[in-house]
Amino acid sequence: MAGGDEAAAWIALRATAGVGDVAGRKLVAEFGSPAAVPTLSRRALTAARREADRIVAGGARLIALDDAEYPELLRELHDAPLYLIAKGARLAEGPAVAIVGARRATDYGLEVARVLAEGLAHAGVTVVSGLARGIDGAAHEGALAARGATVAVLGCGVDVVYPPEHRELAARVAEQGTLLSERPMGTPPLPSHFPARNRILAGMTQG
């Protein structure tokens, strides 16, 4: 977990104009750390420190690309996020499987998702989904019922619940598992965020 000035440097690097996850990764590889990148301005770092403070104040943490908690499989993506924001338990090591599906699922589909997730969780597999209506919510419910690990990858900030009717479910996931996002605190669930969210969900799982 990156903290303080280190977290601010990661945030400032990603927020720098013309620098995204891919270019940011190359800069870190070249200069050794985000703080050593010469293009970081004092103004950017000041703004980034405020964002780092918001993360801590929200009960969350920043997981940088070079952090031991960062999912190993996800790190292999060429456009892996420079950092993730997590709220809840430390991301579990070991196998992880994504269970996602229709928001307007049939009763049969919901039951299958719950049973499958519960069985995987009992076997020590982390169940990863997106906290969406339908199959996603059922998958989290199944993992929680098994007292297993579950991760909700969000297309908004970890302090924003979407859909709103999953507020209680999100709280339970944060208590037993982890809410995870690449978005800043307070970011709303814009449609354009979800395709990028899906690369994280798929990238950190074996199947």
Image (cartoon, helix red, strand yellow):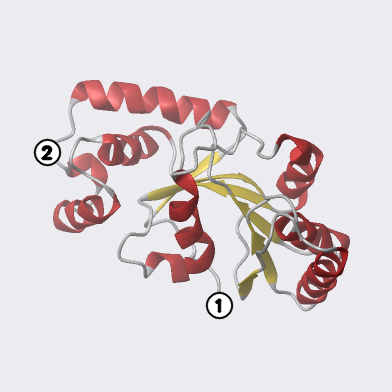
Residue receiving disc 2? 38
Residue receiving disc 1? 206
Q: Which mark is residue 195?
A: none
Question: In the image shown, does 169 or 126 lie closer to the viewer?
Answer: 169
Q: Does dot 2 land on a helix, a strand or a loop? A: loop
Q: Tell me, yes or no, if residue 182 can be seen here.
A: no
* Relative to 31, residue 125 above or below: below
The three-letter code of the residue at mark 1 reads Gln
Question: In the image shown, does 17 or 87 lie closer to the viewer?
Answer: 17
In the image, is 120 to the left or to the right of 126?
Answer: right
Percent coordinates x, y for residue 157 in the rendering: 54, 37
Q: Residue furthest left?
A: 38
Q: Residue at x 24, y 40 (%)?
A: 35
Q: Does dot 1 land on a helix, a strand or a loop? A: loop
Q: Quadrant of residue 2?
A: top left
Q: Residue at x 28, y 27 (%)?
A: 45
Q: Earlier in the sequence, mark 2 or mark 1?
A: 2
* Relative to 67, residue 43 above or below: above
* Relative to 137, residue 188 above or below: above
The three-letter code of the residue at mark 2 reads Pro
In the image, is 23 to the left or to the right of 205?
Answer: left
Question: In the image shown, does 94 or 201 lie closer to the viewer?
Answer: 201
Question: In the image shown, does 102 or 79 lie closer to the viewer?
Answer: 102
Q: Residue at x 50, y 59 (%)?
A: 198
Percent coordinates x, y for residue 21 in the rendering: 29, 51
